[in-house]
Amino acid sequence: MKVASWSALHPGRAIAGWFVFVALCLALGSLVGTNSAGDKDYWVGEAGRAESIATDGDLQHKSAERIMVTNKSDAPLGAEARSAAKDVAARMKKLDPVLHVADPVRSENGKMLMVEVTLKGPRLEAQKHIDPLLETTAEVQKKYADLRVEETGDASVEVGLDDQRADDLATTETITFPITLITLALVFGSVIMVGVPLLLAISSIGASIGLSQLVSHLLPDAGVGNNVILLIGMAVGVDYTLFYLKREREERAHAGGRLSPEALVGIAAATSGRAIVVSGLAVILSTATLFLATDVIFSSLAIGTIVVVAVAVLSSITVLPALLVKIGRRADRKAARAAERGKRVKARKPEETGRLWTALLKPAKNRPVATLVVSVLVMLGLAAPVLGMELRVLSTATHSRSIPEMKAYDRLNEAFPDLLAEHWVAVRSDAGDKEQTREALTALADRAKADPLFSKKQPKLESTDDGLIHMMTLSVPHKLNSSEAQDSLKHLRDDMIPATLGKVDGAEFGVSGPVAQDVDYLKNQNEKMPVVIGFLLLLTFIMMVLVFRSVVISVLGVLLNLLSVAASFGLVVVFFQWGLGSTLFGFEESATSGIGSRVPLFLFVILFGLSMDYQVFVVSRIKEAAMNGVPTRQAVIDGISKSAKVVTSAAVVMVTVFASFMFLHLAEMKQIGFSLAVAVLLDAFIIRVMILPSAMILLGDASWWPSRKMRKAQQDAAAQAGSVPPPPVPSSATTLHLHR
């Protein structure tokens, strides 16, 4: 840990350098801005192929906003409503972002007039130009106070969603910071020590946001990067600092004033600092497997996580050692002044395990077989519901109804049931097949009108001037996320198109649309999931073998991580898919009727990485004791006892941060926050306290197979114990100091 040693010897430069780095990251990020993902970045499967064909002919569907006029009393519309609809249409035509305004359309029940406004440019850029439309709608609403004039569409919903996200993040900060402060105060009992973890976590988050903006110009951002940076950054930033601080304080207590602050920080760097670097690298490598999903959203999640973890690790080996040296020197000066005045300075005693943790570890120590069996059965029982997990894409239809635009979306869907669920059939043919393609499209339209799964209205057909590319829009009179809508897509792709367009030689075609995009996205994820998980398990195993030099420990670590992840997934199913979360916490129905398609894969990767934090930290303490000659059984108890308080503190901070995301309105973030919080609790209090010590006690020296160094250390200790009384095991501080 040469970097940490240099920082400890040059604290002023290290601290200044860190804050210059943070400021530089923020400045450069603000200067270049964020490169957001475009429409093409989301193309997947057949739907993506259809979008490509349509885009080549400039026939792709544009972003559309719908302005609705209804009576507040829900009565049939009269002359005033018709006047309002004409007024809003005329005003919209004058706006620069508007490409086309359709004539007002009356719903079948006569209670709604709808004006469709098509925007210029790519769909994903429409949000940037939506404000004039929203302002115009608001002006018409003021003019016709007795009517309800409202607007909805992908762009306006996204604006409402952004406002909601901002409010939600403020809520999480309100919850997270006070509880984190209280936890740190209880752990350290010092205002200065409380401020250090928070300062480093916040500065790491700031630097990561700036760096992620720079990286977005290499890999576009899907708009989820900052959320994950805040989520993961606060948790690991405080955790890594906790691990470091606790080790430094432990060594300070053992040294009893005999070592300088620089030496103490050097010891902490060689032990906990090394564990932090290893665990951070494990999180980075595991998260990098998300790139194998070849999906822009997963790539954005991976970039956010990798950047913030890398920055948090960097802070722990640069500015943190420097701050600890500064704080240590201040404490030494304070003690020296007290001694000059004749005051007795009370030495800090080494921390004891405490009654709670002694009691918790007693089952594994005294009855390892029973403890292991019962604990594993409990975890398997919690994991059982995962067998019935149902994944679905949480699209626009699943957003919170606290967004006004979503309430308008529901009213629009009710009045025009065949408006929002559409299939877009794109086809490209050779010049010699124009007539045959036209005939096939006519036959397809006739089949759709005669099929009960499709709308009776005439399908819309658009073609390029040369007649080589066509786009046909088929409406479905069912809700976007309904089984009927998915059945219509399957029938269209498997039966109707092969019988029509499939007969045209050389024709290239595909089906896109809101339903098709969701279906293809989920299919792509399911195909890539085994690849990602396979690489993740392999990387985790290799990483642990390199760190602990033990195949047995590595296999055990992978199995325990799988158990922790499976149990947390099982609880996600119970709370969200089965609806227990709605009963207990009042979650919205949209958040509890299914599991977001992106949730399992993202969580699997992140939880494996975060579990490595505890695995590396706890097993490193066990290995350290065993290498000093302590028998494996006692080394397990000693290692877990010494790490118990800091693991608990870190778990409390992590659970607080993750649980705060359950208060967000976005269904996927609720599920991610809940799963992470539950997984950390299970990992800290069942995996590391019950299952890990029980398994290692039963395995004994076999835990370290095939490590020759460990076998020799244990044999030498056993031989010495058999010939002469064993000397007391020196503290890590003394041992490492002598080596230095």
Image (cartoon, rainbow, N blue to C red):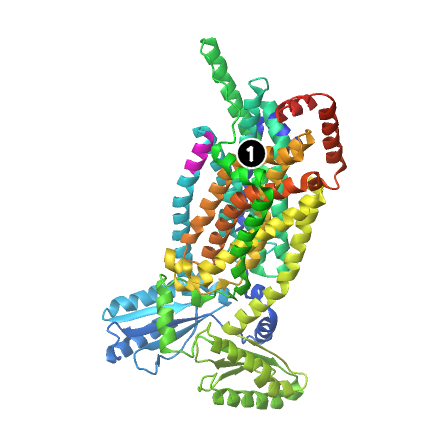
| Residue beneath the point at 35% across and 69% down | 408
Mark 1 = which residue? 641
The stretch in magenta equals 181-188
Q: Which sits in the foreground, 453 or 226?
A: 453
| Screen quadrant of the C terminus | top right
Return the x and y of residue 512 as percentages of the image width and height: 55, 74
Q: As drawn, is 658 to the left or to the right of 290?
A: left
Q: Which sits in the foreground, 163 or 277?
A: 277
Q: Which sits in the foreground, 557 or 74?
A: 557
Whether residue 641 can be seen here: yes
Q: Which sits in the foreground, 455 or 236?
A: 236
Q: As drawn, is 31 to the left or to the right of 550?
A: left
| Residue beneath the point at 56% across and 87% down | 441
Above or below residue 395? Residue 60 is below
Return the x and y of residue 72 as percentages of the image width and height: 25, 71
| Residue beneath the point at 28% across and 68% down | 141
Return the x and y of residue 576 as percentages of the image width and height: 45, 60
Q: Secondary structure at mark 1?
A: helix
| Quarter where residue 296 is shown | bottom right
Whether residue 274 can be seen here: no
Residue 240 falls inside the magenta stretch = no
| Quarter where residue 616 is shown | top right
| Residue beneath the point at 55% across and 82% down | 491
